Amino acid sequence: MVKSNKSKKHATEQVFKHFSTLPHSSCENLRTASGKFVYLRTDQLSQLGRNDEKMPAVTGRNISARGVGTIFDNRLILTDFQFAFSMSEATAFNTEQDLFFKQLRQETAESHKKLEDNPLSKAILTPSVSIQDYQAYLTALYGVTIACEDQIFPAILHIVSELPERRKSRLIIEDLLATGCSESQIVALPVYRFQFSSVAEALGIMYVLEGSTLGGKILYRHIHEVLGLTPENGASYFWGYGTQTGNLWKSFISSLTQFVDQTGERDAVIDSAKRTFTIIDNWLDQMARPDGRIRS
């Protein structure tokens, strides 16, 4: 039996009683019943007035929403809303942008796996990992992490939000100091210099560096168990954004996929990400020493 619109509305309202309102950054790229996309960008919402308000129902794969919205650049923007999710990842919507993200992951999988198989990367996950192994890995990551902050952040400032919160080179410095490195050793560490010529290429680099925060959660658990380090004492880098790691990752992916949707520079982003995985793999090889000690 087909339910009436009234009964559907009642069912949706009942669901909403059991879910909390989610932040804008967690809820991108849904479809309205007419097929329009919903973009929930905080920087856009702050510029919107309350004219032409609607009370639309929004649906997508395993998601429903209802709230007040307005039209901006031919897109419906929800401003007061509630969501009910039954999915593991808030970015996994059945849209062109979701397809791009899947393609990005698939086409970078080989170079990503090669980086994970780098001896310096593998050493950090062994049961016998030492403080020296840990320091060697951090010092190698420092060179590309600070390069990303110095070079890439200014190029994507108008696209990616919360960049100050995404700075992590200072965390590496704190961890190195906490585990016995001297300031003179840290000051002498080599820094990589990325070569890029477009915003799309910069975003491909950022995708790789920002994605490392997800793997950092696994590395933190291992380092904590084996070496006894904590976010307050030697393991702040791998702890990363803490409880905000998932939200900041989804926010970044949303900004990245929207950029590709608006510019069509899909291939440039993917090629840059693939190249960046290879660059970091080669950088780790260059930074590694047979004795596992940091360069001075």
Image: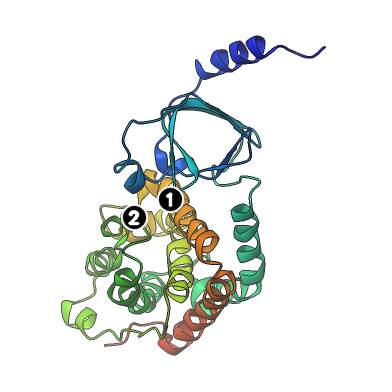
Residue at the image position 41 percent from the left and 70 percent from the top: 130
Task: Identify which residue, 56 or 85, lies in the foreground.
Answer: 56
Specify which label sits upstream in the sequence, 1 or 2. Answer: 2
Horizontal and vertical percent position of residue 194:
39, 83
In-image side of 270 versus 208 (left or right): right
Horizontal and vertical percent position of residue 255:
45, 56
Q: Which kind of residue does numbered mark 2 sit on?
A: Ser
Based on the displayed image, in which of its 4 quarters is residue 88 positioned?
top right
Number of other residues with Cα within 10 Å of mark 1, as a class: few under 14, some 14 to 19, many 20 or more: many
Q: Is residue 170 above or below residue 57?
A: below
| Label 2 sits on residue | 161
Horizontal and vertical percent position of residue 116:
56, 71
Tell me if label 1 and label 2 are in contact, CB under 8 Å: yes
Q: Is residue 19 above or below residue 122?
A: above
In-image side of 271 versus 176 (left or right): right
Q: Is residue 38 above or below residue 112?
A: above
Task: Identify which residue, 215 or 16, lies in the foreground.
Answer: 16
Q: Which kind of residue does numbered mark 1 sit on?
A: Ser
